[in-house]
Amino acid sequence: MPVHNADIATLFEEIADLLEIENANPFRVRAYRNAARQLQGMGVPAADMVAKGEDLTELPGIGDDLAAKIQEIVETGKCRFLEKLRKQTPPTITELLKIPGLGPKRVRALYHELDVHTLEQLARAARDGRIRELPGFGAKTEQTILEAVSAHAEKQTRFKLAVAAQYAEPLKKYLEKILGARQVVLAGSYRRCKETVGDIDILITTTDPEKIMNRFVAYDEVKDVLAKGSTRATVILKSRLQVDVRVVEQDCFGAALQYFTGSKAHNIEIRRLAQERKLKISEYGVFKGDKRIAGDTEESVYRSVGLPWIPPELRENHGEIEAARAGKLPTLVKLADLKGDLHAHTKATDGHHSLREMAEAARSRGLEYLAITEHSRRLAVAHGLDPQRLRKQMNEIDKLNGQLKDITLLKGIEVDILEDGALDLPDDVLSECDLVVGAVHSQFHLSRAKQTERILRAMDHPHFTILAHPTGRLLDTREPYDVDMLKVIRRARERGCFLELNAHPERLDLLDIYCQMARDEDVLVAISSDAHSAQDFDNLVYGVGQARRGWLEKKDVLNTRPLKLLKPLLKRTMI
Ligand code: DGT
Ligand code: CA
Ligand code: CA
């Protein structure tokens, strides 16, 4: 069974964390982080490249040393260097890293200065007021840490959708290959495209349930079998992801799929509708008395309660049932509707590929335009552009556009929004861009009033076009910053600006509720990959999933416009 890219990336991240805690050379730490990121975004499994004897050092950011480590992990499942590092550090230290706001640098200080090894010791140190004494911490940070520790204790571990996909899709393929398996469907929150999933729910129809169950628990990646019967089984994979499998009769398939897709809140509402009609719905079908009247397809289940089929992404009991009843379900945007991408980086800053490579990758996915939006100078860690380097890139883009067929590069910038709402580059150079994507990359903890004012001011800038990752959240590590999104959306409407839905699996930011809000306020949303390498365009599908959860239709999405219609929209008309 191959090692997944996500597994290798996790090991590399751990190496980087441990090195950083031990105060290693920052360049070395960065090399591991970049490699982890590269692996996360890659469509091709590194294990396949190793199996084919391909040269891993061809990958961006992978040198001889990292290539050897990837090969070692693929072949042995282990990394001796990491094991050595782990022995040097108390194992509980890495638990501290899971607390939002605690990066390796802070953990290093807590560990070396205060001798904090465990979460309990961390909470005690915070309560005793010892953390505020450390340089770079302070009373506010101490309080935040205390709150985060208690929040962490309550939160069970969930998997990001894209990470769950790396485990769920190969398992699905494995199950499909078993002779006698008919349909194998991933249901639950995974099918609803939730940003994170608690576990994977798989529904299988077959003529031979016993065989399916035996083969399922024999899957190479199964670590523990929690339950196994003839129709249901639950296992934990080596990745710690839990998987529930249910085997059902073919003629119950629709009812079972509807039931196990959820959400629970949606199902409860559907069952209530059924009761009003003196019907009973279960995972086995729709019943009138003892007679089964529907259940072979999902459509038949919804039809029995007088509704059209409802797309899984909408099934959260957030108004979809009323909309379905009124014949007002949205026709949700699809991946194929996207005509271009409005946020991408190249190796001029922290990306891994050249302008031409990025353009060709976007074209190969059927896109007709791609905006290059590098970081601006303020973001020094990403080697952000100053006006001179930005102008140089704009010249290169002009030249390249003369040579490229079937794809147009747009000249953009991801400019930092400074603390006072000013933009990080002068007006004259911004005015030369086709679009200006503004982003908050610092000062996440401003008060709601100040954060909102900061963003509104940035949008008032005559050249501002799109607000990047509008809430700043990172799924594992950072809560959204506090901002009045309705005010932001209304200002965008007034100023003719747009909001981004950043498709990076770690961000998926705009949140679904704000997508709905943007649509209700007539503000278009740009579904953007934020690609840092050619493979990252694959992430657009997660952005589309999130947009669908936010009820967006093709017309609500900026980059479903062909270039000809996009251009007049980017030209700021309402200043
Ligand atoms: P997750 O795994 O936490 O991301 O969320 P789900 O939605 O996948 O939830 P899960 O795995 O507990 O259950 C899968 C589906 O099964 C759920 O979406 C709806 C259905 N289901 C589970 N328990 C109940 C229940 O008590 N009542 C009803 N009506 N449906 C349930
Ligand atoms: Ca689930
Ligand atoms: Ca489940």
Image (cartoon, grey):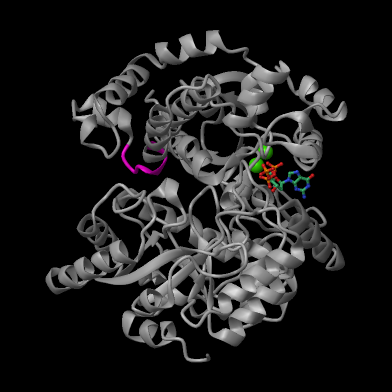
**Residue nearest the observer in this picture, 470 or 182:** 470
Over which residues does the magenta segment extend? 39-44
Residue 546 in the image: state x and y as whole percent. 56, 60
Q: Is residue 534 left or right of residue 189?
A: left
Q: Return the x and y of residue 360 as percentages of the image width and height.
A: 22, 59
Extreme residue in the bottom direction: 574
Q: Quadrant of residue 457?
A: bottom right
Is there any visible trace of residue 539 in the rendered image?
A: yes
Quadrant of ligand 3: it is top right
At x 50%, y 83%, the residue is 462
Q: Is residue 94 above or below residue 464?
A: above
Instruction: Please indicate, yes or no, whether residue 229 appears anywhere in the rendered image.
Output: no
The image position of residue 193, as x and y in percent, is 57, 53
Q: Position of residue 329 (x, y in %)?
A: 63, 75
- Which of the pair 447/136 is nearer the observer? 136
| Residue found at x 59% / y 42% | 249
Residue placed at 35% from the left, 56% from the top?
A: 345
